[in-house]
Amino acid sequence: MHSPARTRAIMKKLGTQHPNADTELHYRNAYELLVATILSAQCTDERVNQVTPALFKRYPDAQALAQATTQELEPQIQSTGFFRMKSKALVGMANAVLERHTGEIPARMEDLTELPGVGRKTANVVLGHALGVPGLPVDRHVLRVSNRIGIADSDDPEVVEQQLCSAIPARQWTLTSDTLILHGRRICKPKPLCDQCVVRDDCNYYQTVLRVAARPGKTAGGGREVRGVKPAAARPKAAARRVNPRRAR
């Protein structure tokens, strides 16, 4: 794993490729961001942004949402997927916010993660973007990109969060997550676009898997396995051509 100093240098480079990185969810306050983030599970931000304007108009705060039933809510969020589970989480969250926090979204990790449907990643999104509390959300993009580059080394999102937070100043935690998420969506996809990556020369995955595969006489199978990304299998040798005896004369 790269040193903290090198991790900071890599993030600075990535920042030039994704300037002004931010969440792509639309929101006006902590309540709206919490609802949008719960809906974003297994769903694109674009789809969530299509659903939330009407939802926020009908349920402008936790008090209004707490009065909804899951049967009323389900058809309104159906297009985001897993709508039955999400409707229960939203109604449960709103009721808990009303009962435990007088309708205000709490600004502590411990309080947020006690709400129905709210895990550590969701809590960090709300803390960092809407409540001004440093937080570093680790989603599948952050997990993949950080392990590939070598600025983290774990399959556990909470461990990756700790590793990144220990290397990055707290004031940059949220921006670090946003930058890695955008890099994972645009460049470092499951099939990465390494020719477009500004940190290719710093990337463990590129150096130990892709570059090795490109060397004459080498295959990707000869590279070290990077956590979360297995080297591509060596390409099978092409079958020898059969030579027509007549043509060979």
Image: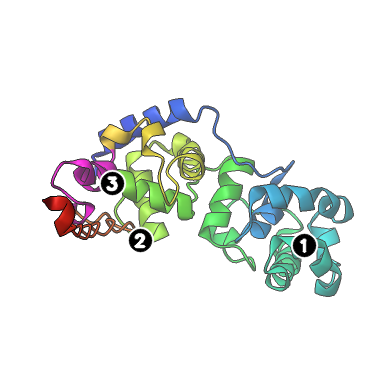
Counting from the top left corner in percent of width and height, residue 112 is at 60, 59
- Identity of the residue drawn at 23% across and 57% down: 238
The answer to whether the residue labelled 3 contacts the one labelled 1, judged by CB atoms less than 8 Å apart, is: no
Q: Amino acid at mark 2?
A: Asp
In the image, the segment drawn in magenta is 203-223
Looking at the image, which residue sits at the far left?
249
Helix, strand or loop status at disc 2:
loop
Please tell me in which quadrant of the rendered image residue 199 appears: top left
Closer to the N terminus: mark 3 or mark 1?
Answer: 1
Q: Amino acid at mark 1?
A: Ile
Report crowding for label 2: few under 14, some 14 to 19, many 20 or more residues within 10 A (C-alpha).
Answer: some
Q: Is residue 83 magenta?
A: no
Query: With respect to residue 113, does 45 lie above or below?
Result: above
Q: Which residue is identified by label 3? A: 205
Q: Is residue 209 magenta?
A: yes
Disc 2/disc 3 C-alpha distance (Å)? 15 Å
Helix, strand or loop status at disc 3:
helix
Looking at the magenta stretch, what is its main secondary structure? helix
Counting from the top left corner in percent of width and height, residue 10 is at 33, 33
Q: Which residue is identified by label 1? A: 77
Closer to the N terminus: mark 2 or mark 1?
Answer: 1
- Identity of the residue drawn at 23% across and 46% down: 1
Counting from the top left corner in percent of width and height, residue 237 is at 20, 58
- Label 2 or label 3, whichever lies nearer to me, is 3
- Label 3 or label 1, whichever lies nearer to me, is 3
Please tell me in which quadrant of the rendered image residue 180 appears: top left
Report crowding for label 3: few under 14, some 14 to 19, many 20 or more residues within 10 A (C-alpha).
Answer: many
Disc 3/disc 1 C-alpha distance (Å)? 38 Å
Specify whether 71 is left or right of 228.
right
Q: Which residue is identified by label 2? A: 155
